[in-house]
Image: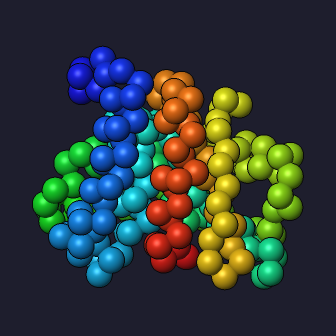
Amino acid sequence: MERAHSLSESERVNQALAHVAALPSKILNLHVDEQGHLAEFVLASLCDSTCCDIAKAALVINNPDFNCCCGAAGYLADEISSASNFATKETFERMCSDFDASLFHAKVRALNHTAYATTNEDYQQLVQELGFSSSAQICTMQLKNGNRGIFVYEPKKKLSDMLAHFIPLIISLFGFCPLI
C-alpha cells in the first residue's frame, strides 16, 4: 500500500487503468453476474486504493420518464473489504457479505423519491441527504433506457487532474450492470 502513494501521476493513472481493464476478466472468472452484486463489485473495484482510492461513493439512478430516483449501491471504505483481494470466490463472497452488512450501502439502497432535475442544486441535495461532505464530487452518466446515473464520491485525497479526467470513462462500466 505504501508503494501506491509514491507513484508518479502517470504511473498512478496507468495503475488505475490497468485495474479497470482487468475487471471484465475478474467478472467472468468469479461469475459475478450469476451471483448478483455486480454493481457493488464494480463500485468496490473503482474505489479501491489500486484504482481511484475513494473513501465514500454512491451510485444513484435517476429516471425522469418514471419520475423516480433510486439508490443502486453505496461504498464506505471502512465497511468494505479491499477490492484488490477479490481474486477468489471466497474473497468475492466476503465482499458480498460486507455490502449486505454495510449501513451506508443500505442507506443508499433505501433512497427512493421523485426524479431530480439535472441542476447542481438538486445534486447538492442528494449529497447532503446521503451524508457526504461539501467537498464531494459529482459525475453523471447516461445509462440505457433513458436513465441517468449520478455518481457521488469523496476521494481519500485529491485526485490528480489526469485521474479525475478518467472518472467519467471509468464509471461508464456501471452501464453494463443490472442496477435496480
Q: Image point 37% across, 69% down: which residue?
A: 37
Left or right of residue 113, residue 28 in this image: left
Left or right of residue 71, residue 44 in this image: left
Q: Is residue 77 visible?
A: no
Q: How is the image coloured?
A: rainbow
Closest to the observer, 113 or 168 = 168
Q: Can you give x and y, in whole percent of width and height, for residue 179 in the image?
A: 52, 73
Task: Report the number of numbered marks.
Answer: 0
Left or right of residue 172, residue 147 in this image: right
Q: Can you give x and y, in whole percent of width and height, for residue 133 in the image?
A: 65, 32
Closest to the observer, 112 or 122 = 122
Q: Can you give x and y, in whole percent of width and height, for residue 69 in the image?
A: 72, 68
Closest to the observer, 157 or 9 = 9
Q: Quadrant of residue 28?
A: bottom left
Q: Image point 24% across, 27% down: which residue?
A: 1
Q: Image point 67% across, 55% down: which residue?
A: 140
Q: Can you give x and y, in whole percent of width and height, for residue 108 in the image?
A: 58, 57
Q: Image point 27% across, 56% down: which residue?
A: 22
From what the image shows, is residue 17 above or below residue 114? Answer: above
Q: Is residue 137 visible?
A: yes
From what the image shows, is residue 29 above or below residue 172? Answer: below
Give the quadrant of the C terminus.
Answer: bottom right
